[in-house]
Amino acid sequence: MSGFLNTFFARASRALACAGLMLAGAAQAHTPYLLPMIFDPAPDAVLSVDAGYAEKFFLSEVNFGDTRFVITTPDGSVLPFGEVHQLKSRTVAEQKLPGAKGTYRLSTGVRLGSIFRSWEQDGKVEISRDGSKTPPPGVKLLSHYQSHSVSEAYVTAGAPNKRAVEPTLQGLEIAPVTHPNDLFTGEKFEFTVLFDGKPLAGQTVDIYRSPMDLGSEHTSASVKTDAQGRVAYAMTQPGVYLALVRYRGAAPQGAAAPMYGYNYTLTFRVLTP
């Protein structure tokens, strides 16, 4: 019996240690975002966006990094942001809109970040984000992946249209069913979570509401997609929201790690009717 108890408690200790590390990592994790300064610009306005990594939305602590910030226009063509400035705590990008009315999709492009490894040694789980640090020979590797972040938002000049809202069918993304610039309290925001164009069933989506001031904390909720990868999120309060999806998937051949830890966020605004 003593041997059984020793084995049981050893396994329980390993499980608790692993869970504790996972929870600590989640608590300390910064979430990527992109925030337009206005959601209803004039067709020829200079559009400005902030992007970065934050624990409290939308107060960036780490800049997004050197990526290809782009705008998909109402006719589906793609423009780069003309100015991108990397500050220490955030990234600022600006571009004059081409004068067309309709909906624009704003994207940070892909940021490849840290490489994570975890392994079990002497009954303890070790986690490293140092790409040069590898587990000792013969030690069981539990995970090995690189972070892959994309953040997006939509703005509409005049009446909304859906050309820029169509999914790219590449990587992890939220494909709106309800138009993302036509959201009001008392209604539901319907969207589908896709990976390479295929719906992800049972996928967790974390949704945050920012108070947009320095004194209050954001609120949050977690929902899961249905069998068709859809969510119908009831919007009870106005404000600026962020929806976050995380997904682990195989990295392409030649990548720095065998897996990617995909992070996709969508910023949207909810108004009072």
Image: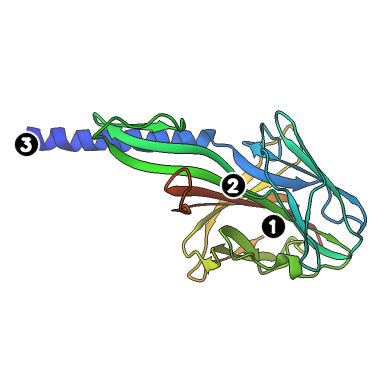
The relative height of residue 93 versus residue 77 in the rendered view (above or below) is: above
The relative height of residue 125 versus residue 192 in the rendered view (above or below) is: above
Q: Tag 3: residue type?
A: Met
Q: Quadrant of residue 3?
A: top left
How far is mark 1 from mark 3, CA to CA? 55 Å
Q: Tag 1: residue type?
A: Thr
The residue lying toward the viewer, choosing from 202 and 88, is: 88
Decide: few, some or many residues near mark 2? Use Cα within 10 Å; few <14, some 14-19, many ≥20.
many
In which quadrant is the C terminus drawn?
Answer: bottom right
Q: Which residue is pictured at 21% across the width and 33% down the height?
A: 10
Decide: few, some or many residues near mark 3? Use Cα within 10 Å; few <14, some 14-19, many ≥20.
few
- The answer to whether one can see residue 8 in this image is yes
Decide: few, some or many residues near mark 1? Use Cα within 10 Å; few <14, some 14-19, many ≥20.
few
Q: Which residue is pictured at 40% across the width and 37% down the height?
A: 117
Secondary structure type for disc 2: strand
| Nearer-N-terminus badge (2/1) | 2
